[in-house]
Amino acid sequence: MYINEKLKNIWYGCDYNPDQWLEYPEVLEKDIKLMKEAGCNVMSVGIFAWARLEPKEGCFSFEWLDEIIDRLYANGIYTILATPSGAMPSWLAEKYPEVRRVAEDGVRHRFGNRHNNCCSSLVYREKVNIINTKLAERYSKHPGILMWHISNEYNIEDCHCENCRENFRKWLKARYGTIDNLNRKWWNGFWSHTYCDFSQIDPPGDHGEGSSNPLKLEWFRFKNDNLLSFLNGEIEAVRRVNPDIPVTTNFQGFWKVDYIKLAKSLDYISWDNYPMWHSDENERSVAVSTAMFHSLENSFKKDRPFMLMESSPSATNWQKISRLRRPGVNLLASMQAVAHGSDTVQYFQWRKSRGQSEQFHGAVIGHDNTSDTRVFREVASTGNEMKNISEVTGSLTKNEAAVLFDYDNLKALEIAQVYRNESKDKNFVEVLTKHFGALWDYNVGCDFVFVDEDFSDYKIIIAPMLFMMKDGLMEKLESYVKNGGVLVSTFASGVIDEFALSFFDDECYPLRDILGIKAEETDCLYDGQYNTVEMFSEEYRVERYCELAYASGAEVIGRYKDDFYAGMPAVTRNNYGKGTAYYIGADFMQDGYKRIYGEILKDVILPLKMPKSPENVSITTRYKDNNVYVFIMNFNNNEVELEMQLDDYEVLSGRLECGRIEAYGCVVLKIRKAE
Amino acid sequence: MYINEKLKNIWYGCDYNPDQWLEYPEVLEKDIKLMKEAGCNVMSVGIFAWARLEPKEGCFSFEWLDEIIDRLYANGIYTILATPSGAMPSWLAEKYPEVRRVAEDGVRHRFGNRHNNCCSSLVYREKVNIINTKLAERYSKHPGILMWHISNEYNIEDCHCENCRENFRKWLKARYGTIDNLNRKWWNGFWSHTYCDFSQIDPPGDHGEGSSNPLKLEWFRFKNDNLLSFLNGEIEAVRRVNPDIPVTTNFQGFWKVDYIKLAKSLDYISWDNYPMWHSDENERSVAVSTAMFHSLENSFKKDRPFMLMESSPSATNWQKISRLRRPGVNLLASMQAVAHGSDTVQYFQWRKSRGQSEQFHGAVIGHDNTSDTRVFREVASTGNEMKNISEVTGSLTKNEAAVLFDYDNLKALEIAQVYRNESKDKNFVEVLTKHFGALWDYNVGCDFVFVDEDFSDYKIIIAPMLFMMKDGLMEKLESYVKNGGVLVSTFASGVIDEFALSFFDDECYPLRDILGIKAEETDCLYDGQYNTVEMFSEEYRVERYCELAYASGAEVIGRYKDDFYAGMPAVTRNNYGKGTAYYIGADFMQDGYKRIYGEILKDVILPLKMPKSPENVSITTRYKDNNVYVFIMNFNNNEVELEMQLDDYEVLSGRLECGRIEAYGCVVLKIRKAE
Amino acid sequence: MYINEKLKNIWYGCDYNPDQWLEYPEVLEKDIKLMKEAGCNVMSVGIFAWARLEPKEGCFSFEWLDEIIDRLYANGIYTILATPSGAMPSWLAEKYPEVRRVAEDGVRHRFGNRHNNCCSSLVYREKVNIINTKLAERYSKHPGILMWHISNEYNIEDCHCENCRENFRKWLKARYGTIDNLNRKWWNGFWSHTYCDFSQIDPPGDHGEGSSNPLKLEWFRFKNDNLLSFLNGEIEAVRRVNPDIPVTTNFQGFWKVDYIKLAKSLDYISWDNYPMWHSDENERSVAVSTAMFHSLENSFKKDRPFMLMESSPSATNWQKISRLRRPGVNLLASMQAVAHGSDTVQYFQWRKSRGQSEQFHGAVIGHDNTSDTRVFREVASTGNEMKNISEVTGSLTKNEAAVLFDYDNLKALEIAQVYRNESKDKNFVEVLTKHFGALWDYNVGCDFVFVDEDFSDYKIIIAPMLFMMKDGLMEKLESYVKNGGVLVSTFASGVIDEFALSFFDDECYPLRDILGIKAEETDCLYDGQYNTVEMFSEEYRVERYCELAYASGAEVIGRYKDDFYAGMPAVTRNNYGKGTAYYIGADFMQDGYKRIYGEILKDVILPLKMPKSPENVSITTRYKDNNVYVFIMNFNNNEVELEMQLDDYEVLSGRLECGRIEAYGCVVLKIRKAE
């Protein structure tokens, strides 16, 4: 499946802002020459260009953009065209104050920054609709246009304006029907929080309600829905004109927006990836975390490739420390995206702006306006390798393992006062990363699977800290395991329902039957405190979480060694129907997780899907027709020797001399599939 | 003296919120059964129930409460009935904006949270008066009612509304008479701070005056007086109906409210105790700190027992880390309260709420709605021990040592820019705790004594960092020592008067005569810097504070060893009248304090009052008629052997086999008094 | 050159606030006696006395001040008279709200604090003009008046009132002419930041534009210009009456205000120095940092002495930890000011106030109102030494080395997102201090030189992190080196122009020709990460910054040893015209800088100007007529032996027995100049 049949190679390019350089015609000219030199075939154009496109209300200026798109196309470079809603022009902010957000203290924001509009503002929606329609009418039939890049890095910041408050109340009313129902679901008898009417409800904030968990959770959901409705409006505008141009918007590598909701409205998923290479002793933690985000993005639409929309060809300028990337790391990082299912490698940004906040952000072309730089050479060399792996385009990953993930669950953990408040998310992301990292160590590809998806495609589903058990989820998990699936559950699971109400009485411990255990208490440890678990005749250190569970049918694999719960189960296995359910009751160090998954996976995943590799060497696969593409990535700063047997392969990219792979090297192989 | 003659046992129970469970009649039924199983005899009811009691303005709903109180009483369980002012209902917040606080930036708070009303609002006072009167009329003659629980955890947060500002000005005018007098007392010539009129005075804040020490100090006092006046209003409402029901309000374990003022309006003192057991290498620091708070609460009314109103039967949900309590620790912690003079042991909360911010707070009954839990068993077993020590009820502590403590002094230290600004309170609480801890090590019970109390009952008074010397206090101390008392003074003492003016000229060094030293300068050390004091032929390390004093009559016990003041006195003793005054000029590590107090106490306290015990084993006593009740508490996680001779005793609770006491064990003995 | 011919000795005195003590006539009497005892000859009077001078609008009260100035003069003590604008009286704040600042959230500040007026307020300017004129009329002919002390510690806090916003827009319009020009210079095409009109521009802030670098930079400049205009107004008022009284205002030891601008309006520079002695293992870092600030202040007007206006004779009360000064350190710190060019040593404060925020700030006279204190004796002894060095008055430093420093450059580094955002100023001050410290180690006096000054007087100019290269500066540097100067440049230099636009294309690397290198990338290291540079056959550790440069003519002195840029130049030397240009591409530890400057200086500075001294012993010189005054300061807490030969000298102050100088000792020598 190709993102756009017009370009069946790996899309390779950049965010490109010619609107900032219209007074430098010689620069615009040179750009084309250098883009070709760098091997680029696509540019994202028009992001933040509203003030150039519509310098005054209703006065449009498209000539410059005509010329840019034409010229790119004439030179074999396609355009991903952006809608410009990510930053409003000054006249809009001035004439229609309602488009600007209102802060929690009631003060309306002044003009400035970006990503700053109120999503509830009908004026803003209307103005976006107009400019989007104009753009679609003018460009959506242009042969050089590949895709729509809707806005930029949508976020869900609070707005406390009257429109948002009113919309929130309406949204609640639509969801709960009566205020009594809301009071009941929110347990508002507590602290006399009972509302008499929807009109009394305000968003949470420092000057208002700061303690209501369900209010915070619903405010999060409302903001996502409000954003989604805004996104849908943007998409409708461009689709109305030409429904054939696929649509994306660029996600970010964080956990703040419920992208599961947004993803459904998009044709393709794209995201912006800014890993902090060389920040640590070695690259493992960055490599695992990046692999995890790639897998997440790849999972939003499992039947098609995703896109790497932004990455820095060099250091960013906004991270704590602007560390350079070592030679080869740009290629390695780019290949890592493709290895996990991306069909594009794009940079922010083609060219450093001369001024403003991102003027020092890494770019293909620096202020010296030359290709005679180390960075350019790395980019051009990466471009070359992208051509070598052209045939990978359209292939897909096929993972047998998946992490069950839900933004509401994470948000509920963030909101709740429970467990380890020292960590806002109660260490959720760290725990998730440890699980994912264990599979990464075994070269087992791992999807993210979402609550409303079909589980049956997976041999193993990992559900770390599944604090919120939404309606029907337990039944899905039961059925999944009964039919032969392997489930891995952990501490802090099955505690609240989707309204953040604790399960009560018989409904408590919804996972008890599947797991064959009942978890009664959760001991949280201070930093620096540990317990030990004995399993497989060895001892493993655990930290942070030690749940106290009683086995009610499960086989005990590991037991605590210390404290008053010494001897109690820490890791269990339960046969349930045709499947198996594991329970990991403590937060192990990475070695413990690796040991446990070694045990779990060997019964579940075919050895072929778990090729052995040296430490910090990752192997992934993509499939197309009868071809298997294997990516071998060495995240070590030294050459290593591979253990795998690769007799019958073709090298598409990289070198593999005598089975050795260079420091930060990446090799892409093609194997004709036997089956 | 019994809190209420109706119940002469240790009161054992919980905060109970049936108002949250009215839709679960089977739960309310089960509650009674489980309460009896747990050995409970009292419940605190109605805290935060305003919205249930008065769902609309003027519409009251008491039937549910009738039923609860009746049913409890029918089952042998008494009720502590709360006034519901701790959380306003939504209709009140909506209809009368003035009841909501105004933040420092002038923005009025929206509805939400709790403990959020403006104490100046006459509307709020009136509405509270109405509901309190209604409650008193309906319930204060009920045989099951033991006591009033006024509001909840009163606090003194800022409110910047016009009413508060105006009240503050009136309060100042009443206190100072003329603006000239205020200007003089506040030293307002500084920085042209001279006011022309009381109307110019505003509370301190980030948008206003942030630098005036006397303004901040008086704002603190005003807020306490305003709160006191609010409290008195609440009490009047319920006493007017029936003056025979005793009244309390639950204090908190911190230093923010001037509880000395509030205490005078109450019949009994109660407080909420949430120690963080198992947060440290061992339990000493938590045990000492908790003992100190118990002693403080016990000291507000020295002629009667105090009450432990809240404690968690398990982990809280709001502390940084939710660590479980080890087996036995619930009993030990409960006994510690009784050991220091409490006649009640009560938990927050009987049952975990299903929703909202405290849904995961420890409770006797969890969401699983069962008594088949470790926590319940610990609670029930503690309930059993409480019955075993029933006869302790009504006994009193009789301590011969006291710490002189004053909230104004602490507040003045917090406000002043002086000494070690790195620590907000200039390390006061840490210093206080070290002194208290030294007595704890010697099993010497220590009261808190307040500025306006009689000192003559004590053999030794410790006055750490008595920065503010209020009018008449020096004379009281002089007379105390002259008449044979032992005074321990420290660095940073006798510096300002009660208006925060520095003593001047001849008035400087008000303690000079008593101590026989003159302190000229105070050297403050950075963290990690130390000096050494030589005393008793040994060397002791000191940190943070090294005062430079000249002996003018005192005997020098310890001298500095390092820096330019080597050889100068660090610890002195002065005979003054029939008494002795010690001066500790440096902040020792705990071992230094222990050594000094070993010297001081041996001449002052009878050996019988200082029973020897192993490390981290604490011994306290309570007295009634001719009986002495001895509490031996082992805060170690291992069994220890006691050194004390206890030939003639009766064991009321706990085990003492071969003079050994188990890990986290507590033994209560009864000795018939010889004298 | 004497500050005022009336007093040709070192001015020795204090801030004196008799206005706070008018109700204590005996104190005012005693002051005179003690001042004489302490050797004082000047007092700064009237700072913050507005409320005493004009207690009601238009009602003036000068009698008390008449008496103070007369009495001081009658006793041989001169007066530095302050304008009182540093703190407004309450009636002014009440009657004219516009004089109070408006916070970023739009809330106008209430009365309180100090240094709190809006500089744009015409009312405030008018009221200041009136009181200044009155003061000038009454006192500027008084024989006891030496100087005007304009206001106090001027600062440039934000004010968001309508006047300030409007003034800012006017200032921008005057500077840029058209909004198009501003948009171009600010690169406002970025994020659609294009303004349509000057009226759309607001100051940066949390509720408005927070991301525009040029806006922030210009707001900084505007605030400085607005302050300057306010200062000029104050000065005009007093000069109009009597142009013969010199004018100063006291600067502070920080980097927030562009003092280069203010300095031009003043006759003499004075500053307030509050070093934190004894905060570290030894005194080197405080001594170097203080020397650096003295040199900066001394450099604002290089043809005349500067003034130490405030210093604490003991601990301050506002620093994190109030550490006492060891014996001798008061004299040493006072001499250090003189050693670097000050003709005054003044304290804040003569006498501790009894109340308010500075009541515990160090003072000559404490609350005990006596001279029988260690601090007083130190002050009196210092006063005595000041008399001994009277003849130093009017002498000047003559430094051959200078640091090129510019507030706009520092501000631009603070604003930019680049390099190491972990440090707000990108470690600029630390890097500057390391360079300065290396010269300090060699006893090479070092001026600060500013962008618009003549460079030709210096043999060596050091330009650390010259990020912003203002118009014409490169040409000045070229010409300087061509004509024989030595330039030291570093990483992070020559990046932006004065509008914060990055240099582009051919304009990039403006220093390339001079340095003979081209810096392509800058690798920033995390804390705890290091590289190594090999130079002079030794290895030196570098941290934080490693710039990757290519030599294009320069001789490579040091090369990186590690990472992918091993072998690349880290330190280079380039002959350019008659001069030499050094490039230091990495941030060395102090030892590396010392080694490099050892090499650089030996070819540049005469050995006589680099007298050898033991570690942490600093030597400086001042010149007058044919006399050379040498200051030898021992910052060690132990006696040391000097290595220098001083056969032909006269000791004015201090002792130098057998070439040894005592702990914290300072010796002032006089040498008749040979040349």
Image (tube, coloured by chain):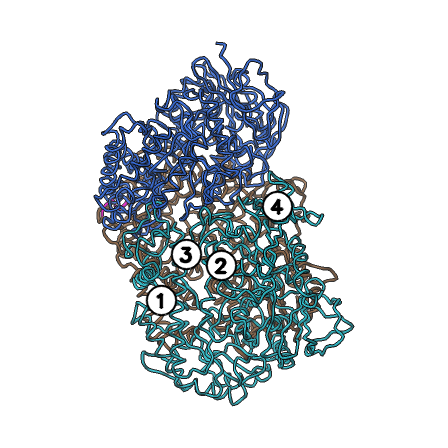
Chain colours: A brown, B cyan, C blue
The amino acid type found where label 2 is placed reads: Leu
Specify the subunit that label 3 lies on. B
Residue B118, label in figure: 1
Bounds of the magenta segment: A52-56
Q: Nearer the viewer, residue C172 or A555?
A: C172
How far is mark 4 from mark 2, CA to CA?
25 Å
Q: What kind of element bears circle 4? A: strand
The residue at which mark 4 appears reads as B569
Disc 3 to disc 1: CB gap under 8 Å: no
Q: Quadrant of residue A155?
A: bottom left
Q: Is any atom of residue A490 visible in this view?
A: no
The amino acid type found where label 1 is placed reads: Cys
**Residue ID at (53%, 85%):** B6
Specify the subunit that label 2 lies on. B
For marks 1 and 2, the one nearer the N-term is: 1
The residue at which mark 2 appears reads as B473
How far is mark 1 from mark 2, CA to CA?
34 Å
Q: Residues within 10 Å of mark 2 (few under 14, many from 20)?
A: some
Specify the subunit that label 4 lies on. B
Q: Position of residue A399 (x, y in %)?
A: 56, 59
Q: Quadrant of residue C48?
A: top left
Q: Do dots 4 and 2 share one subunit? A: yes
For marks 4 and 2, the one nearer the N-term is: 2
The amino acid type found where label 3 is placed reads: Leu
Q: Do dots 2 and 3 share one subunit? A: yes
The residue at which mark 3 appears reads as B217
4 or 2: mark nearer the eye: 2
Say which quadrant the C terminus of chain B sits in.
Answer: bottom right
How far is mark 1 from mark 4, CA to CA?
51 Å
Is most of the magenta stretch helix, strand or loop? loop
